[in-house]
Amino acid sequence: MRYDSIVIGAGHNGLAAAILLAKQGKSVLVLEKNAVPGGMAANGEIADGIQGPQLAHLMGGLGKAEIDALDLKRHGLTFAAQSIPTVALDESGRHVSLRGSEASFADGGAHPDAAAFKTLRDRMVRFADKLATLTQRPPPRLDGIDLREAASLAGLAFGIRGMGKTDAREFMRVLLSNAYDAILDEIDDGVVAGALGLDAVMGGHIGPRSPGTVLTLMYRSIGGGARHIPAGGMGGAMRAFEASAQAAGVEIRYGAGVHAMIVEDDRVAGVLLADGTEIRSASVLSSLDPRSTMMLAGPAHFDAEMVRRIRKIRAKGCTAKVNLVLNDAPRIEGLTAGQMSGRLLVAPSLNRMELAFNRAKYGELPEDPILEVTIPSLADPSLTTGGKHILSAVVQYTPYELKDGWSDKTRAALAKAVVTALARYDSGMAGRVTAQQVLTPMDIEALTGAPGGHWHHGEMIADQMLMLRPAPGIDRYALPLGGLYLCGASCHPGGDVTALPGCNAARIVLAQETRRAAA
């Protein structure tokens, strides 16, 4: 059978692309090597009989426009908790609650940095909202810009100018600067600064002093930067994507790994599965990273300069995931039940974060881990039974290439470092742990195919974002091989669970097909 489009990968971006194509009457086949949808956002087995969010554990970037366009609510997307609070844990016990632009001590007391935090964060959100229009469509061309793209850029320029002289100057001043300086220019170093800094570096091989991290902070501030916990974990949200795709007429095959692409007359003509099955199509959209996609098509079909650019994309994973099964709910003195079920950050200061990044650069295990923690079973008790709980910890600054090598021993050492760090705030933490799952960047690469175990398939930094993502010449989803497109996290606007790369890629495919039909 022949399809209009084949999508490789049933992650949220691949399914988003498939849904939009099918809604325009295209016949679409999605091929997924695993048994469930979701990719890095899928639920998985954390311990015997306990399923939960193995990797991604929060949803923050999926906007109302994408939820509506993909019919996700109609097909089961619900949230166990929305706009959850962020709590910056302090070793002194004076934890800080961050809700939107409001900062206070967890007990409700006034925080000395509250006014400065509000001013800085409100400004970042204003700046982010100006960039948001660029994320919801394919990036403008670097050459041959058309009238529609010119209008989009003009709208951005007028929007920046409309912010007023002070804000416009500040926007241009900080856009490509580092988060460390931008934050500490206005806030003393500590847990509030650390919370902002963590949003600027999360998932990347970058530190708060790395140039361009303010742009990443803006990206994470789009729409106010709220985070949500989907009902059923992230896997529950992925089932909504799956149901919407099937309702639109998309065919999804699980356990169907792609071995190679079929190329004829300098165009992709379909794919060859691992079992030898040939499937024909007019176009192929890959939610894999650019290098894996190129290897499936064959490097011989790309010129030497494009091969070089693809191989030079920076995608060195620096983030691990440690999932713990607890026999009882954690208790941190001074936090309410609502705060405990939110987003807990262990990021004592920007200086401590930069030191942690230094260790990672030299292949050393985190000694003082920087963490983003959720306990999803507090918000969604259906995830566990018998009083057990799941604790999910993102461990920033865990090197892909560990100096001593990854082994059962070093994985256990990483888990111990995480538990020890959490025990500073909950002295009974170690005694509650009944099982643990450690996924290093190397494990993440093996599990998902993400290059280097990088959560975003490529560094989200200024020279790999916007019109430069993932690399010049493939910044608008189409690879230089007819009918072949990227639609995953490596594409504009980048990683996190936004569905924007998939939606934008589908629009490019439809636009190019319209132009070919009219030619």
Image: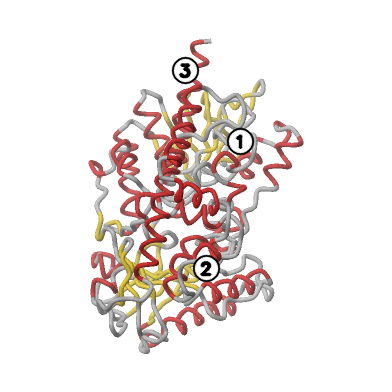
Q: Amino acid at mark 1?
A: Ile
Q: x%, y% of residue 145?
A: 56, 25
Check disc 2 and report its element: helix, strand or loop. strand
Dot 1 crowding, Cα within 10 Å, few <14, some 14–19, many 20+: many
- The residue lying furthest to the front in this view is 165
Q: Mark 2 = which residue?
A: 396
- Quick check: 277 left or right of 303? left
Number of numbered markers: 3
Name the mark on residue 514: 3
Dot 2 crowding, Cα within 10 Å, few <14, some 14–19, many 20+: many
Indicate the quadrant where residue 142 lies.
Answer: top right
Check disc 3 and report its element: helix, strand or loop. helix
Question: Against 487, is 329 above or below?
Answer: below
Mark closest to the chain's N terminus, 1 or 3: 1
Tell me, yes or no, if residue 436 can be seen here: yes
Q: Which of the two residues, 233 or 220, is positioned nearer the viewer here?
A: 220
Q: Amino acid at mark 2?
A: Gln
